[in-house]
Amino acid sequence: MNARVPLSSGFVNGDVSFWYRSSGVPEPGPRLDGDLQADVAIVGAGYTGLWTAYYLKKARPSLRVVLLEQEFAGFGASGRNGGWLTGDLAGSHERYGAGARRLQREMYASIDEVIAVCETESIHCDVVKGGVVNVARTPAQANRLRASMAAARAWGIEEADLRLADPAEHVRVAGALAASWSPHCARIQPAKLAQGLARAVRDLGVPVYERTPVTEIAPGRAVTPYGTVTAAYVIRATEGFTARLHGLRRQWLPMNSSMIVTEPLPASFWDEVGWRGAELLGDMAHYYMYAQRTADDRIAFGGRGRPYLYGSRIDARGRTHEWTVEALWRLLVDFFPAARSSSVAHAWSGVLGVPRDWCSTVHVDRATGLGWAGGYTGHGVTTTNLAGRTLRDLILGEETELTSLPWVGRRVRSWEPEPLRWMGVHAMYRLYRVADHRERSMPRTSALARFADLITGH
Ligand SMILES: Cc1cc2nc3c(=O)[nH]c(=O)nc-3n(C[C@H](O)[C@H](O)[C@H](O)COP(=O)(O)OP(=O)(O)OC[C@H]3O[C@@H](n4cnc5c(N)ncnc54)[C@H](O)[C@@H]3O)c2cc1C
């Protein structure tokens, strides 16, 4: 590893994520053992699959719901993310059309719903609703921040939901020129939420078959090497891994996101930077970062890394390139020079699903019984809960407030075949990097970033 990054003596690269360090990476539970009949088969035991199973069983205890997971519950992005239980929608409001305001309100309410279920089910996932701060560190970013505020107002996001803040009000980031503040975000420990949910659904009588990869999804069945589950409804909850399934390689682009975590920082550090609560922290760069103060006083700091592997390949155990670890560390100490005396304890990566229009979808086709939810574009921690409740209503055939939300049943075109896909995504991130650099000395958003958005539909 690069000598310019101070690594702890026990530094770990990959091994799923830091979030499993205290409990140990789970030993997968029993496999499916032979053919099975169910009412609903759910493929993938991340938050989407787990929430769907949870709400279905709560609504209809007699329903036979089965979860099929290739590794263990919480192996994917749900056990690796930045722990932002955020009210932000994936993609632009415009693309959701007329009902976007209602969808936004449901997103805000979903944060409290997750917190309430955690309380009811005794899921201890270090949740604290401390809000979110976004900082701007160049004049162009500051202008973008102000413009985003005006756009938010147009979409019914009020001052109480999102406002400009003094850059020193919540967290003092070096070089911050402007900041925004929203109360609609909570900090969680992601793996504890995934594991807690898995326990809750098992307690409700849902078998979670682990080490059971689904090789084929078809109307009425999910096929695995260990048996076939026959079910009226088969729900695909595989998000960033979807490209591996037959015929779905171009549906959602598997985008990498990478994180590092420091050793615990002393009280003097938190006093100096004024980060007193569990506020989440993000920025307005094109090549953006996201961070949380963990329950044990570390900074978990994430960003893009190597965004995409040719042919939609997935690097599943989370090992992270040295270059990415160094880039994240450099940015972290640029934000917080006082963290320079710390070291990096763990680095990891995961995949999230990005649709061609960067907006999420939930869908059940009642004729075939096939359904799915995903394309959360890095905003899935809260959205998966809304997806789970919406899938429940769609499967039960109930027309509710949720089933009329504008993300239900959206049809989105596929990504381009290779090598165009790889070229487009890499061009986008290269342009974003150059644009961020240029914006250090210009007041407006760089034309390069606008061009990057244009070619990838961001
Ligand atoms: C590093 C990182 C940071 C992020 N930070 C945030 C954040 O702070 N806030 C936020 O809102 N979002 C964040 N996200 C995104 C968020 O984590 C995801 O949107 C969300 O977890 C998706 O949940 P899911 O259940 O749909 O998918 P996953 O959690 O990826 O679950 C899919 C599951 O399906 C299983 N699977 C896949 N294929 C098969 C198969 N063929 N057979 C059986 N099982 C299969 C996988 O093993 C996996 O367990 C982040 C993502 C990453 C990678």
Image (cartoon, rainbow, N blue to C red):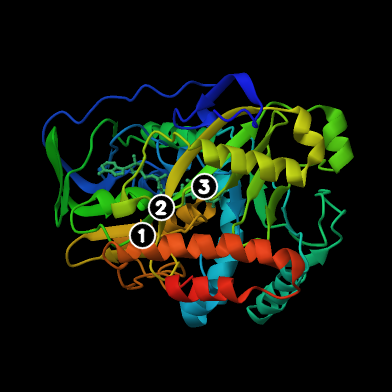
Q: Residue at x 50, y 54 (%)?
A: 378
The answer to whether mark 1 is within 8 Å of ligand 1 is: no
- Image quadrant for the N terminus? top right
Q: Are marks 3 and 2 in contact (CB under 8 Å)?
A: no
What residue type is disc 1 on? Trp
Label of residue 422 in the image: 1
Q: Badge 3 local density, few (<14 within 10 Å), some, or many (20+)?
A: many
What residue type is disc 3 on? Gly
Q: Are marks 2 and 1 in contact (CB under 8 Å)?
A: yes
Where 366 sits versus 49, above or below?
A: below
Give the x, y percent position of residue 83.
58, 43
Q: Badge 2 local density, few (<14 within 10 Å), some, or many (20+)?
A: many
Gap between marks 3 and 2, in whole Å?
Answer: 9 Å
Give the x, y percent position of residue 50.
40, 43
Q: Is residue 425 left or right of residue 433?
A: left
- First in sequence, mark 2 or 1: give its number: 2
- First in sequence, mark 3 or 1: give its number: 3
Q: Badge 1 local density, few (<14 within 10 Å), some, or many (20+)?
A: some
Gap between marks 2 and 1, in whole Å?
Answer: 7 Å
Gap between marks 3 and 1, in whole Å?
Answer: 15 Å
Q: Name the residue that disc number 3 marks.
A: 305
Q: Secondary structure at mark 2?
A: loop
Where 30 sits versus 384, above or below?
A: above
Q: Is residue 226 left or right of residue 65?
A: left
Q: Is residue 157 left or right of residue 199?
A: right
What residue type is disc 2 on? Tyr
Q: Name the residue that disc number 2 marks.
A: 308
Q: Secondary structure at mark 1?
A: helix
Give the x, y percent position of residue 284.
68, 62
Can the viewer see residue 347 in this picture?
yes
